[in-house]
Amino acid sequence: MLSPCPNSPNCVSTMSSPGDKLHYMEPIHYSGSPETAKSTIRHIIRQQKYAEIVHEDDNYISAVFTTPVLKFKDDVVFYFGNHEHVHFRSASRIGKGDMGKNKNRMKEITARFYDQYNE
């Protein structure tokens, strides 16, 4: 599973409580093969100029996103263990706020997933 978000506003997760408006986001829904969903996420990450996949196994893809100017690092983990849902957590390594960067990143990745996923 995924680690819970801290109380700070620089983290979003699909495994936070839906009542937690600060941290909760809907998981990515798909039908079909988990491997196809995983392949789509892998492709989206590789399209990002400042992202690097740092670990991958049967159920997870972990990536680091680096901001271009200040070189802040954000950790993003995708979990594929629940059929028909891609769960994720995106969190800044340092600081308390992120000006919505993690939430916006995951909205963008989710939109790209829905554009690119083919069963």
Image (tube, rainbow, N blue to C red):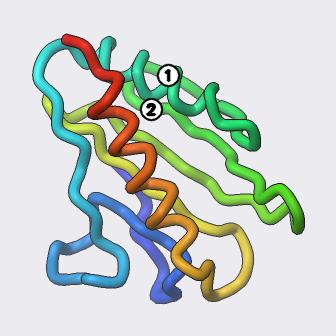
- Given residues 11 and 59, the one toward you in this image is 11
Residue in view at x 16 percent, y 82 percent: 19
- Position of 4 with respect to 54 (left or right) is left
Q: Quadrant of the C terminus?
A: top left
> From the viewer's perspective, is residue 67 above or below residue 114?
below
| Element type at mark 1 | loop
Residue in view at x 31 percent, y 13 percent: 36
- Given residues 35 and 99, the one toward you in this image is 99
| Element type at mark 2 | strand
Residue at mark 2 to residue at mark 1: CA–CA distance: 5 Å
Q: Which residue is mark 2?
A: 60
> From the viewer's perspective, is residue 11 above or below residue 68?
below
Residue 116, can we see it?
yes
Give the image location of residue 67, x and y in percent.
77, 59
Counting labels gives 2
Residue 83, can we see it?
no
- Position of 88 with respect to 28 (left or right) is right
Q: Are marks 2 and 1 in contact (CB under 8 Å)?
A: yes
Q: Amino acid at mark 1?
A: Asp
Give the image location of residue 93, x and y in percent.
70, 68
- Given residues 11 and 51, the one toward you in this image is 51
Residue 49: image quadrant is top right
Residue in view at x 52 percent, y 76 percent: 100
Q: Amino acid at mark 2?
A: Tyr
Residue 31, labelled with which disc? Answer: none
Query: Callout 1: 10 Å neighbours few (<14), some, many (20+)?
Result: few
- Position of 31 with respect to 96 (left or right) is left
Q: Which residue is mark 1?
A: 57
Residue in view at x 38 percent, y 49 percent: 88
> From the viewer's perspective, is residue 62 above or below residue 23?
above
